[in-house]
Amino acid sequence: MAQKSSRTPLIHVISWLLIFSLPYLNFINKPEELLTTNKVFFFLPFSFILFLCLLFYANLYWLAPKLLNKQYWWLYSMIILGGFGIYYLYNIGIFKYIVLPQIPIEDRQKTKDNEAWRNIFRVIFPILFYTLTLLISNILHLLDERRIQKEISRKIEFQKVEAELNMLKLQISPHFLFNTLNNIRWLVRKKSENSEESIMKLSEVLRYIIYDVNADKVSVRQEVEHLKNYINLQSLRVLADAKINFEVDKTSEPLMIAPLLFIHFAENAFKYGVDGKNVPEIAMAIQKTETGILFTCQNKILNAGNSLENKGVGISNVKRRLELLYPDKYDLHISEIEGLFNVKLRLLIE
């Protein structure tokens, strides 16, 4: 926007310099006529264009913005007609009191006889130039109004998106907290020595959710630490021989992404891939690609009959956040094949 606004005055200046110079272009090929041309005729075009220039900006910055609407159209019309009357009298006065006295007496009769030429000079040209000036001024005004309305609409839409994202984050924290507190309750009931450790892990996870995700972007490294804390917290209640693997490509860690995009897939992996009887198999990975990052998650489905893709608000939330934060810049595939739940999420990071 700053670049556009800085160019606009320059365009106006160049345009008016060209318009003011048009009547004098014939002197380029005949510079000697500058000395013989009557100075009155030399400055005459300048005065007409100056009047139109003042009209142009008075209409663009005052008349049109304040009066060119349904409520004041009649006042606008009256002012425009009054302005034309002034411009017409201005042309008549210039011709009668400035141009005509400069014409030799012997040539005045010829000028008088050429009534068509006089009408063109007095009536047709003023109407044409006055109308054209107002037309261009009003077009620029309407374009500027349209641009302003687009900016307002864009700001409103941005505020809606921001409010929706904040709401989705509020949905994220209770959802995750609810599941984790259930796990801690399970450990406390067993009087496990890992209860204190689980509370510490939970505090680290909550610290991340409460403080760090207020930023629009976080590093992949921060997301990885958050996922590791979550995995360690959940691992306290799984069987000792559980196959839980989380691989991270170190080159992806400096990249910046929206927070809390992966945690729901990890939640689902533990929720539907752990039953307390069978050996869970959960594998997650984050890799750097040529255009961004790839997150994968796979778990064995131990709770048969569950339709994992649409369970809870978690995955639906992350889908909505992807649509808002990465429109046309993400690719999400979720599938259930041969007892395995698979997630592949590609993010395009510019």
Image (spheres, rainbow, N blue to C red):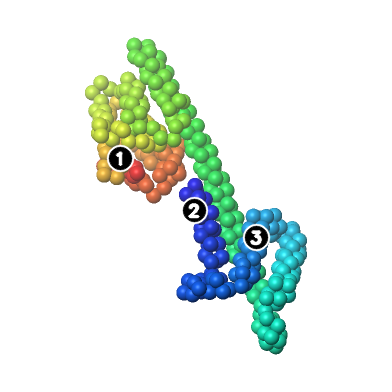
In the image, 305 versus 13, the foreground residue is: 13
Residue drawn at the location 54% of the way across and 45% of the way down: 155
Position of residue 298 in the picture relative to residue 166 (left or right): left
Q: Residues within 10 Å of mark 1 (few under 14, many from 20)?
A: many
Q: CA distance from mark 3 to mark 2?
A: 21 Å
Instruction: Answer above or below: position of 286 versus 67.
Output: above
Q: Nearer the viewer, mark 3 or mark 1?
A: 3
Query: Looking at numbered disc 2 in the image, what kind of residue is underneath it?
Result: Arg
Residue most toward the front?
35
Instruction: Answer above or below: position of 6 versus 301.
Output: below
Disc on res. 152: none
Query: Looking at numbered disc 3 in the image, what kind of residue is underneath it?
Result: Leu
Q: Quadrant of residue 97?
A: bottom right
Residue drawn at the location 54% of the way across and 58% of the way down: 12
Query: Looking at numbered disc 1 in the image, what kind of residue is underneath it?
Result: Ile
The spot of residue 236 in percent (x, y) is: 32, 20
Lower position in the chain sequence, tag 3 or tag 1:
3
Q: Residues within 10 Å of mark 2 (few under 14, many from 20)?
A: few
In the image, 283 versus 135, the foreground residue is: 135
Residue drawn at the location 37% of the way across and 37% of the way down: 257
Q: Nearer the viewer, mark 3 or mark 2?
A: 3
- Callout 3 touching callout 2 (CB < 8 Å): no
In the image, 112 versus 155, the foreground residue is: 112
Question: What residue does disc 2 label?
Answer: 7
- Callout 1 touching callout 2 (CB < 8 Å): no
Disc on res. 54: 3
Lower position in the chain sequence, tag 1 or tag 2:
2
> In terms of secondary structure, where does tag 2 sit?
helix
Lower position in the chain sequence, tag 3 or tag 2:
2
Disc on res. 293: 1
